[in-house]
Amino acid sequence: MSARFGFALLATDGSARAGVMETAHGVVETPAFMPVGTAGTVKAMTADAVRATGARIVLANTYHLMLRPGAERVARLGGLRRMMDWPGPILTDSGGFQVMSLARLRRIEAGGVTFRSHIDGTAHLLTPERSIGIQHQLDATVSMVLDECTPFPATEAEARASMELSLGWAARSKHAFVARLGYALFGIVQGGIFPDLRAASAAGLADIGFDGYAVGGLAVGEGQAAMFEVLDATVGLLPADRPRYLMGVGTPEDILGAVARGIDMFDCVIPTRSGRMARGYTRRGVVNLRNARFADDAGPLDPGCGCPGCARHSRAYLHHLFKAGEMLGPMLLTWHNLTYYQDLMRGLRAAITQGRLAEHATALRDGWAAGGA
Ligand SMILES: [Zn+2]
């Protein structure tokens, strides 16, 4: 039983929005955070554990999956959702970002990008049509257009050429996308840090017409202030009746600022990667559980958190697990960090709905600044 893809705004508070995204594979309340399942798994987590954190949509990477195990194989095995045992919606990126950051000998042309696999050196060609075809084979609920993530820094001329290339690829991606009930294709705004280019990109994408709109090319070294400036110049130009997705962002502070500017969806490796590296995100800031001061600390990591690591274990135990190199340490802390991020999003949704986002933001920042975690 498939539902039509849709997005409904439930409340606004300033520029911030609370809404609901309906898909073929379930409903997602927004603002939403998508855990990153790079290679078809949210690292160190079972699918049930991911769902227990409150996550309702996860992200997977086209680049990694096309190389290993291969999109055709995933399709033969019933699609990525079946393989992962994740019944909910999945969003796949187009592969473009990882080609730029991971692949060797890459060459960008109007047709697409040729590259060699970072795993075994085999040659591949990724075109807009091929990217959309792979995402179809993966059975992605939400597919992304192939784009070029404009490097930072870039001159205005470089950013313009990159943005125009991405706009052409966006049109080809739309043409290649096979519409199915409850499935969606999102466009991606590029243009570097230049407001005029961002505006041209947003207008061009709206002319083509997409189910949702992402802001790409940020969190690549420009800094939070520049990122917020780009959002201030861009978000208001995106169709208000479609979900807006800020790709690859970010810290809790980044997310708070972006939600206040009207962003509805996020993905980032920070909570999962940090969890594997002993960094815990809490209501009282970030802590490093390798720190010796936790060796005898019998208290929970975050008293406000209901995850297994906080509800059933002490900081001293988590410290011990990391010191001993036990795999349960990364597992428990990943679970905690993802729970913290989902709690953060739930709190933001409630605050927007109740029209008290500004007060809520102040309380969050006061907690992070107070430390003591
Ligand atoms: Zn916890």
Image (cartoon, helix red, strand yellow):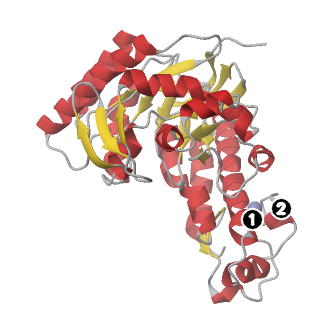
Give me the residue at 37% from left, 11% from top. 208
Q: Position of residue 10 (x, y in %)?
A: 66, 22
How far is mark 2 from mark 1, CA to CA? 7 Å
Residue holding disc 2: 308
- The image quadrant where one finds ligand 1 is bottom right
Left or right side of 196 for 345:
right
Q: State whether residue 268 is above or below residue 146.
A: below
Q: Residues within 10 Å of mark 2 (few under 14, many from 20)?
A: few
User: Which of these two is toward me, 4 or 21?
Assistant: 4
Looking at the rendered image, the quarter that the N terminus falls into is: top right
Label 2 with label 1: CB-CB less than 8 Å: yes
Residue holding disc 1: 332
Is label 2's Cβ within 8 Å of ligand 1? Answer: yes
User: Which of these two is toward me, 131 or 60?
Assistant: 131
Residue most extreme to the right: 312
Q: Quadrant of residue 157?
A: top left
Callout 1 secondary element: helix
Q: State whether residue 359 is above or below residue 301.
A: above
Give me the residue at 76% from left, 48% from top. 53
First reached walking from the N terminus: tag 2 or tag 1: 2
Q: Position of residue 119 (x, y in %)?
A: 44, 53
The residue type indicated by label 1 comes to Leu
Callout 2 secondary element: helix
Q: Which mark is residue 250?
A: none
Q: Position of residue 201 (x, y in %)?
A: 29, 24
Q: Quadrant of residue 278?
A: bottom right
The residue type indicated by label 2 comes to Pro
Left or right side of 363 for 143:
left
Q: State whether residue 32 is above or below residue 317.
A: above
User: Which of these two is toward me, 86 or 134?
Assistant: 134
Give me the residue at 22% from left, 36% from top. 194
Q: State whether residue 149 is above or below residue 23.
A: below
